[in-house]
Amino acid sequence: MNIIEAIRMRRSIRDFKPDPVSKTILSQILEIASRAPSAENSQPWEFTIIAGNVLDNIRQANIEKLNAGAPPHPDLHSKGLPPASVYRRRQIEIAKQIFQLMEIPKDDNKKRDRWMERGFRYFNAPAVIIISVDQLLHYPRPLFDIGAVTQTLCLAALSYGLGTCIANQGITYPEVLHKLAGIPESKRIMISIAMGYPNIDFPANKVVSHREPLENITTWCGFDEKKSG
């Protein structure tokens, strides 16, 4: 698979086979991902890879906090999308596609709650990669770098037949990860990536997110100028 194919094929996988992903494969993917660009070669990312009983315990702790109504407080602060904006429209469009495929009615709050829980369980993935940065780095300086390494990691995973889902639900309660995964308090937890072999029969794995036409988001400058002389 070449890089163009990987970019076009990458999508969010929301359910996985139970088959474990070997430490060898995960190490190879991380080695490739670490070639991602970073400002001034700062390489701010740090990886914590979680599987087995530790991952099961984290899933359970996340769900317990969610069901107890614990307010979200991720290290990576994010506000909701502006109402009536094109950004919110795109979010709604993908949600509608997922709920239709999963046969979740608009007014079925129980099914919607169960669906939301999937993110806090890392979509049943056999492995999860948590990316964190040192608190010494002033926020939001490392955000671009973390985005670059995250995308590189997800593209590299495709070459091994693996799927991924980049999600912030799994970092909603950072104290769970500090305690159960041993991530030091000196680290800011940035994002989680669920990883595993895709369950191709799962309805939501058939979601294809649409992209805005290029002419709506692109301005060309200087390409129509005629050379003098």
Image: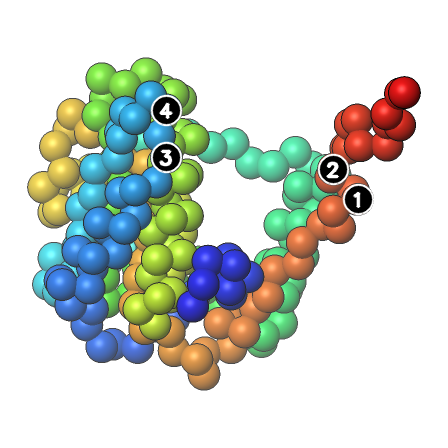
Reply above or below: 62 against 139.
below
Question: Tag 2: residue type?
Answer: Thr
State the separation of the CA atoms marked 1 and 2: 5 Å
Question: Tag 1: residue type?
Answer: Glu
**What residue sits right under mark 2 in the picture?**
218
Q: Is mark 3 on a helix, strand or loop?
A: loop
Which circle's residue, 4 or 1, is located before the other in the chain? 4
Q: Is mark 1 on a helix, strand or loop?
A: helix
Residues at discs 2 and 4 in contact (Cβ within 8 Å): no
- Residue occupying image coordinates x 74% and y 37%: 218
Residue 37 circle label:
3
Tell me: 89 left or right of 148. Answer: right
Query: Is residue 220 visible in the rendered structure shown here?
Result: yes
Reply above or below: 31 against 123.
above
Residue 215 circle label:
1
Residues at discs 1 and 2 in contact (Cβ within 8 Å): yes
Tell me: 228 left or right of 50. Answer: right
Looking at the rendered structure, the number of numbered marks drawn on it comes to: 4
> In terms of image quadrants, where is residue 40?
top left
Question: Tag 4: residue type?
Answer: Ala
Which image quarter is the N terminus in? bottom left
Question: Tag 3: residue type?
Answer: Pro
- Residue occupying image coordinates x 40% and y 56%: 155
Q: Is mark 2 on a helix, strand or loop?
A: loop
